Image (cartoon, coloured by chain):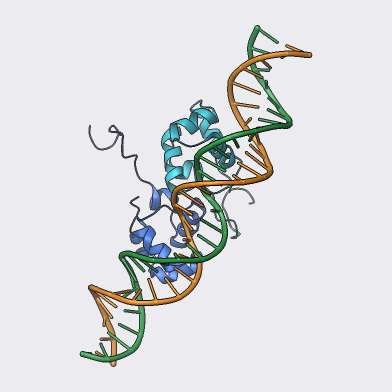
Chain colours: A cyan, B blue, C orange, D green
Amino acid sequence: MKNNLKIARFQVNLTQQQLAEEVGITRQTISLIEKGKYNPTLKLCLSICYAVNKTLDEVFWVEREGSENEDDAAN
Amino acid sequence: MKNNLKIARFQVNLTQQQLAEEVGITRQTISLIEKGKYNPTLKLCLSICYAVNKTLDEVFWVEREGSENEDDAAN
DNA sequence: ACATAATGTAATTTATATGTTACATAATTC
DNA sequence: GAATTATGTAACATATAAATTACATTATGT
């Protein structure tokens, strides 16, 4: 469950604590999401996106893993 | 919790049942998500996106409600 | 070295997403 | 108008997101 939250958070210059307060959740939840340790709800993802001024795709999109052919790395 | 899942599902010509099977969840969950009755997890959103061949933004993005000034509609 | 701030993480609890079973309605199709 | 298919929903059970509390580690600053 990789994501770009940490980078996005740095770009708006917020600590985990500050972001958590803006979003209305705890710092621990932010930490766990950044570490990819779990699986936030859509509503939370959206709240986070608003706080870091990015879209869902920018922060949380990941290509499907199981499938083989992507268009960036290998070829 | 509005979204475009129903439209996206029609575009790939799947029933709720078929989509649910592809994603590995129940038809009821698809139904509830389409009706905006709740708040799926990110992993489920991604699985759905893969199944309907769209991105998170295309299916699940909604502008923040509470705030007024965006940069598309008003001015 | 000692504060302090920022972060990682674990245990326990609570809220809620999701599964299961079941029944209802609307639209097809016979 | 009786099957069948697609969908909406409700009650209850289970899995897990998220809160809470707590403690550890890693900067950063003095």
Kindly identify the residue that appears in the image at 54 percent across and 40 percent down.
A29
Kindly identify the residue that appears in the image at 41 percent across and 52 percent down.
B39
- Is A44 drawn above or below residue A69 in the view shown? above
Could you say where residue B40 lies in the image, as x and y percent from the top left? 44, 54
Describe residue D12's horizontal placement relative to residue D14 as left or right: left
Q: Residue A31 sits in which quadrant?
A: top right
Q: Nearest the camera: B11 or D5?
A: D5
Q: Nearest the camera: B52 or D23?
A: D23
Q: Is residue B8 visible?
A: no
- Is B40 drawn above or below residue B23 in the view shown? above
Q: Is residue A55 visible?
A: yes
Q: Nearest the camera: C24 or A13?
A: C24
Describe residue B7's horizontal placement relative to residue A45 as left or right: left
Could you say where residue C1 lies in the image, as x and y percent from the top left? 78, 14
Could you say where residue A8 lies in the image, as x and y percent from the top left? 51, 34
Kindly identify the residue that appears in the image at 42 percent across and 68 percent down.
B27
- Is A35 drawn above or below residue A13 in the view shown? below
Could you say where residue B47 lies in the image, as x and y percent from the top left? 50, 58
- Is B68 drawn above or below residue C25 in the view shown? above
